[in-house]
Image (cartoon, grey):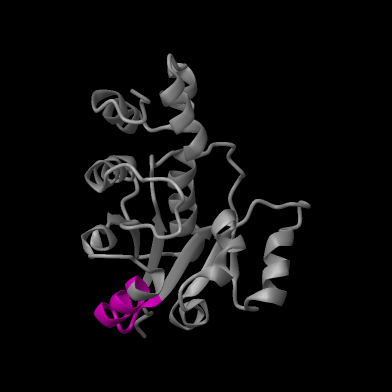
Amino acid sequence: MNHAKRLGIFGGSFDPPHIAHIALAKHAVEQFGLNELRIIPTGDAWHKSRTLTPSPHRLAMTRLAFVDVPQAVVDPREIDRQGATYTFDTLQALKAEHPDADLYLFIGADQANAFKTWHRWQEILGLATVVVADRPIDGQGGMVSQWHNAVSPDVQRLDMPSLNVSATEIRAHFAQGPYSASKMSAWLPAAVQHYIEKHSLYRLN
């Protein structure tokens, strides 16, 4: 008996991609037995209040960041798509390309909080199993239990340690300068750190 292909989807602005993103990818592959994990940098992020770093830079950094995750495939479709990009459209396209695959959509706790504002969120639940990388608020995965009440009982939880790193903080450190190279190496893969320095990303001037 052939088991269905397990295809994961992990999207985000990846501005920049950091060690928590990579940890999520590795835990997702292991916990859910993924055959492939599509890493999908967002294109025109309608929900972002700030301007994103130009997409060629974010795509290049994302390719550098996930090179050590064999199942990870960086997928530029949302960057290539014209206009606003929605997760629903991406999932629908992937389902059409892989009709026999089981889709797993991995989102962070911050995205989970806003999930019911997403475009066609109810239909997303029909296309993919939603998995939340939960930061437990009470040690018991309280956020997911709230989700069961508010969103869907089928939401899964990704078991991974909480890593205290944020892209916002990383950008702020580069903007303020001079920054601690040792702190950055704890937050960023070396190749991504070098790329940011080479292209002078996140500097204020």
Q: Which residues are magenta?
A: 90-102
Q: Quadrant of residue 10?
A: bottom left
The answer to whether residue 5 of the structure is visible from this angle is: no
Give the total number of marks visible in the rendering. Answer: 0
Q: Position of residue 129 (x, y in %)?
A: 50, 74
Q: Position of residue 1 (x, y in %)?
A: 36, 85
Q: Quadrant of residue 64?
A: top left
Q: Is residue 63 left or right of residue 170?
A: left
The answer to whether residue 146 of the structure is visible from this angle is: yes
Query: Residue 50 versus residue 133: which sits nearer the camera?
Result: 50
Examine the rendered structure and indicate whether residue 82 appears above or below residue 171: below
Q: Is residue 131 left or right of residue 195?
A: right
Q: Position of residue 98 (x, y in %)?
A: 28, 78
Examine the rendered structure and indicate whether residue 64 appears above or below residue 84: above
Examine the rendered structure and indicate whether residue 3 appears above or below residue 200: below
Examine the rendered structure and indicate whether residue 111 appears above or below residue 94: above
Magenta stretch prevailing secondary structure: helix
* 133 inside magenta stretch: no
